[in-house]
């Protein structure tokens, strides 16, 4: 029944459109004008609409910036993240300035130079000086953006990792597992062919370094202590995304990737700032299958004492896998 | 082929070798696919704004993929994948280039037809076959491809990883291989025709910017599409013949695969070696079209013709050395990331030149607001808005936190999607009189434009905020994470505008088909334009001009030239005594 109703409505709308078209064509025939010829009146209306849309569009943009600002991620909770945030606000301000100059200018020109039968356009085919200026100015501005960007990139990607605590993040459809390197700060070897039973990460138990490794489903970090995350994937490409720390790295089967960073705020501090619900979360950010939208693991940043208490409760691989 | 020969129904409308008919075939097929792609986006937008809610329309259209009217997560991914595939390849590559390259090249350079009418016909029919195979994949048991339009293996290689990587993916790959063959046949033809068949006097410096843009687009296509074909063939080998080009160290559903030594990153490199030039294959024709439309309707020469050509060349060249910016987070050597950041941000320079030159063209113009002109100005706006956010995504350090989030979705839909679609609309409104000998209704064009323009910004601008909130793209719902709870508000706004934008396209489609049959008769040169196509008679003949092909004596942008009798001087008018060329 509803389908028939919808069909009737659609049909009526089309019939209405046809009639409107016919009427407008017949009217202009009576007036001896061409309905599709752009008149001065059209130019006037459309030009003014462009002027109006300037305010509507820019108003909409400002409205979003005001009312949706609280949705944006809080400031970075990592050392390199703060540098990235600096670059971000520099770039964002730059593009907002350019946007708020060029957009109104474009629409204003559309309004200002709306056509009139009596007007003649100004024949102006080129001006080398002008063109050189607007080649050189963007070049200079971009050089600054590039230099600033590359410096930030180098700082973010090449931190000193000699003191970093090594943790492995292991991805599979559709969950994360973490492996702490233990007291020797070295991960035991692993191979996908060794995945079996409870040894879900395929850790080589004959490797001495693996004995003190600790496998967990929640990552705890110490504030102001550098950490080196090493990523592996078992099945498809995943991407480990920690938005609050400004950390992201793909996890690729058959390949090892890594990312080092230093957290600067504890979960407790962030809860105070952002509300009780706040958690540091690891998300998957590369389409990986049906439940891609729900692949998460909690990260907790805490003080050294809290961390020590937590890690002491966790069992090493030697205890969990070999002694049954 | 200088004489208009006899045509039967089949040679005229189906297996036509006339470039004008082939252009219309590409256009109509492209529009058909655009409607399908748009409906798909409307369906998944419903889910995104109302996670888990039941809609009768979903069950009606998708059947078992929306049990009880709730969209299934794997069908969500399939819709996203097919929407991307259809819009990128079918609408904005074949629909845009196929239509306007075919239609405009011979008419604007003064040729009877393409260099090879037969190859041109083949190009369309390969495209048609590809379309059939792609649509077929929508109806297979395990659903269409659903690993994202970028089809990264291993996800796309393993049917165990996602249902869409079964038969759906096989058909996707077959379809894209056919598509590439069609595209290559077309592109080769375009290049040869432009270089060899220009009429007397049509030097490269007198080519309309549309043709320059199409020429560079075709060159990009010829150089990059074969790489995607290679990538697809290797993926087919991995999927069906047990090779390990892209696969290594994989356990899927508890099954240990034998594949060793391959690298998924290799696929990403091959894919984006096409994928980035592809962005400009989509963009350049649109920029070419609006260069023409803006000049005609400002009644002014395009400002800085040589700089415009130079900028096109620079963009085309740079587009080949920036593909790595799609892969900053793959674990590539940070130094390599630096190089790609550098080359990527350089593209902003020629892009800025183009924007400034468009602005200078409007300045002190006598702007005629045809529907085409409205879309052309809107294109400059989206090119500015979307281009600027590229400064964030192209900067590897900033990409760390916005990579693969909705910020990217907002960015590329504005700078590539909207820009190219607006160029396509501008082209259709502008050349419709030439294609069908009738006019599209102006007032319906106005309504279509304003509805589209407002809706489109309403859809894609808010996405930047989703991205800056950290929301990854291709999420079936944002409700699995408490940190994204508030974002459903933004998603509702986006979905509202998406549906309204879709509704306004119905007006366009209606106007288009109504005008083909019932539109008012067009004058020979309705926009008082200089380019050669408007010197050809209104009625379609195979061979374009009844007598001799016109000769060209000037560039195409002599609008409002001091000393001229009218505010336009067609290219086939000889210079007056003492007149300087420009």
Image: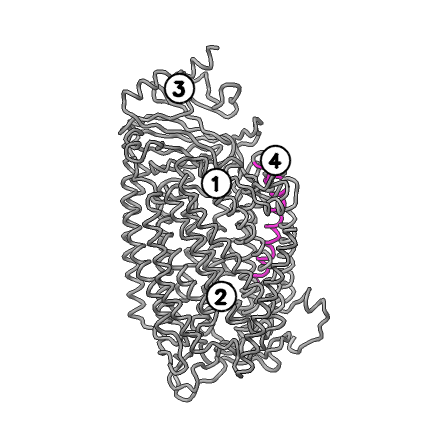
Give me the C-alpha separation between circle 4 and circle 2: 55 Å
- The chain ID associated with circle 3 is A
Which image quadrant for residue B256? top right
Q: Dot 2, crowdedness within 10 Å: few (<14), some or many (≥20)?
A: some
Q: Which mark is residue A213?
A: 3
- At which x and y percent is residue A312? 34, 16
Give me the C-alpha separation between circle 1 and circle 2: 34 Å
Q: In the image, are marks 2 and 3 on the same chain?
A: no
Of marks 1 and 2, which one's residue comes earlier in the chain?
Answer: 2
Which image quadrant for residue A277? top left
- The chain ID associated with circle 2 is B
Viewer-nearest of discs 2 and 3 = 2
- At which x and y percent is residue A283? 42, 35
Give me the C-alpha separation between circle 1 and circle 3: 33 Å
Query: What segment is highlighted magenta in the picture?
Result: B162-188
Report if residue B275 is visible in the image. Answer: yes
Q: In the image, are marks 4 and 3 on the same chain?
A: no
Q: Dot 1, crowdedness within 10 Å: few (<14), some or many (≥20)?
A: many
Q: Mark 4 points at which residue?
A: B242
Q: Is residue A254 above or below residue B351?
A: above
- Residue B181 drawn in magenta: yes
Q: Dot 4, crowdedness within 10 Å: few (<14), some or many (≥20)?
A: few
């Amino acid at each position: 029944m509803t389908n028939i109703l919808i069909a009737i409505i659609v049909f009526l709308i089309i019939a209405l459109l046809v009639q409107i078209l016919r009427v407008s064509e017949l009217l202009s025939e009576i007036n001896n004008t061409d309905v599709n010829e752009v008149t001065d009146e059209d130019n006037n209306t459309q030009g003014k609409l462009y002027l109006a849309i300037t305010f509507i569009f820019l108003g909409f943009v400002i409205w979003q910036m005001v009312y949706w600002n609280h949705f944006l991620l809080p400031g970075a909770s990592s050392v390199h993240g703060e540098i990235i945030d600096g670059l971000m606000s520099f770039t964002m301000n730059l593009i907002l300035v350019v946007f708020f100059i060029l957009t109104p200018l474009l629409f204003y020109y559309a309004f200002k130079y709306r056509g009139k039968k009596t007007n003649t356009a100004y024949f102006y085919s080129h001006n080398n000086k002008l063109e050189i200026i607007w080649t050189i100015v963007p070049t200079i501005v971009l050089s600054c953006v590039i230099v600033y960007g590359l410096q930030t990139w180098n700082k973010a990607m090449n931190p000193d990792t000699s003191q970093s605590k090594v943790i492995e993040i292991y991805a599979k459809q559709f969950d994360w597992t973490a492996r702490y390197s233990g007291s020797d700060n070295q991960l035991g070897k692993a191979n996908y062919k060794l995945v079996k039973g409870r040894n879900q990460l395929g850790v080589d138990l004959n490797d001495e370094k693996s004995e003190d490794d600790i496998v967990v489903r929640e990552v705890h970090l110490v504030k102001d202590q550098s950490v080196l995350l090493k990523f592996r994937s078992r099945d498809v490409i995943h991407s480990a995304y920690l938005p609050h720390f400004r950390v992201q790295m793909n996890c690729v089967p058959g390949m090892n990737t890594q990312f080092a960073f230093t957290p600067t705020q504890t979960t407790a501090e962030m809860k105070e700032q952002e509300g009780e619900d706040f958690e540091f979360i690891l998300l998957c950010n590369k389409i990986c299958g049906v439940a891609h939208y729900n692949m998460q693991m909690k990260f907790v940043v805490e003080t050294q004492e809290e961390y020590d208490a937590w890690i002491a409760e966790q069992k090493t691989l030697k205890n969990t896998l070999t002694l049954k | 082929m200088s004489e208009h020969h006899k045509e039967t129904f089949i040679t005229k409308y189906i297996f036509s070798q006339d470039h004008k008919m082939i252009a219309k075939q590409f256009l109509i097929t492209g529009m058909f696919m655009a409607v399908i792609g748009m409906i798909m986006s409307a369906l998944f937008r419903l889910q995104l704004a109302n996670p888990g809610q039941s809609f009768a329309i979903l069950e009606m259209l998708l059947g078992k993929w929306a049990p009880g009217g709730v969209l299934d997560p794997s069908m969500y991914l399939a819709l996203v994948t097919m929407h991307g595939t259809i819009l990128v390849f079918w609408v904005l590559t074949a629909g845009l280039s196929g239509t306007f390259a075919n239609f405009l090249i011979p008419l604007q350079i003064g040729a009877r037809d393409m260099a090879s009418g037969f190859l041109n016909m083949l190009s369309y029919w390969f495209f048609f076959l590809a379309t059939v195979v792609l649509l077929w994949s929508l109806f297979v048991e395990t659903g269409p491809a659903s690993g994202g339009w970028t089809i990264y293996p291993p996800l796309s290689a393993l049917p165990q990883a996602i249902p869409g990587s079964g038969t759906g993916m096989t058909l996707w790959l077959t379809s894209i291989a056919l598509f590439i063959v069609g595209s290559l046949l077309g592109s080769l033809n375009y290049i040869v025709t432009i270089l060899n068949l220009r009429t007397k006097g049509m030097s490269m410096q007198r080519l309309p910017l549309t043709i320059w843009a199409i020429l560079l687009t075709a060159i990009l296509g010829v150089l990059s599409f074969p790489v995607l074909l290679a990538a697809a063939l290797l993926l087919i080998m991995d999927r069906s013949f047990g090779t390990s080009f892209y696969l290594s160290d994989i356990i899927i559903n508890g099954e240990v695969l034998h594949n060793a030594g391959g690298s998924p990153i290799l696929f990403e490199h091959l894919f984006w070696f096409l994928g980035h030039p592809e962005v400009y294959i989509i963009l350049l024709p649109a920029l070419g079209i609006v260069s023409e439309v803006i000049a005609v309707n400002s009644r002014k020469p395009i400002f800085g013709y040589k700089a415009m050509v130079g900028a096109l060349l620079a963009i085309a060249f740079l587009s080949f050395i920036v593909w790595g910016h799609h892969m900053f987070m793959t674990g590539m050597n940070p130094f390599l990331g630096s190089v790609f950041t550098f080359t990527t941000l350089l593209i902003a320079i020629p892009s800025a030149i183009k924007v400034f030159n468009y602005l200078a063209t409007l300045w002190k113009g006598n702007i005629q607001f045809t529907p085409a002109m409205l879309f052309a100005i809107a294109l400059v706006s989206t090119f500015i808005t979307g281009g600027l956010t590229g400064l964030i995504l192209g900067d590897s350090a900033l990409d760390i936190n916005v990579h693969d989030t909705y910020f990217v979705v907002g960015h590329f839909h504005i700078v590539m999607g909207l820009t190219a679609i607006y160029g396509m609309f501008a082209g259709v409104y502008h050349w419709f009189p030439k294609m069908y000998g009738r006019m599209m209704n102006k007032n319906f064009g106005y309504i279509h434009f304003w509805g589209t323009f407002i809706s489109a910004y309403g859809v894609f601008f808010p996405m930047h905020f989703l991205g800056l909130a950290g929301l990854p793209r291709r999420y079936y719902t944002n409700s699995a994470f408490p940190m994204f709870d508030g974002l459903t508000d933004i998603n509702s706004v986006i979905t509202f505008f998406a549906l309204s934008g879709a509704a306004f396209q119905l007006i366009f489609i209606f106007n288009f088909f109504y005008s083909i049959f019932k539109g008012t008769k067009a004058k020979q040169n309705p926009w008082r334009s200089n380019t050669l196509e408007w010197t050809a008679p209104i009625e379609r003949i195979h061979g374009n001009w009844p007598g001799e092909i016109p000769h060209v004596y000037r560039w195409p942008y002599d609008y409002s030239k001091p000393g001229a009798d009218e505010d336009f001087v067609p290219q086939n008018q000889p210079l007056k005594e003492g007149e300087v060329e420009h």
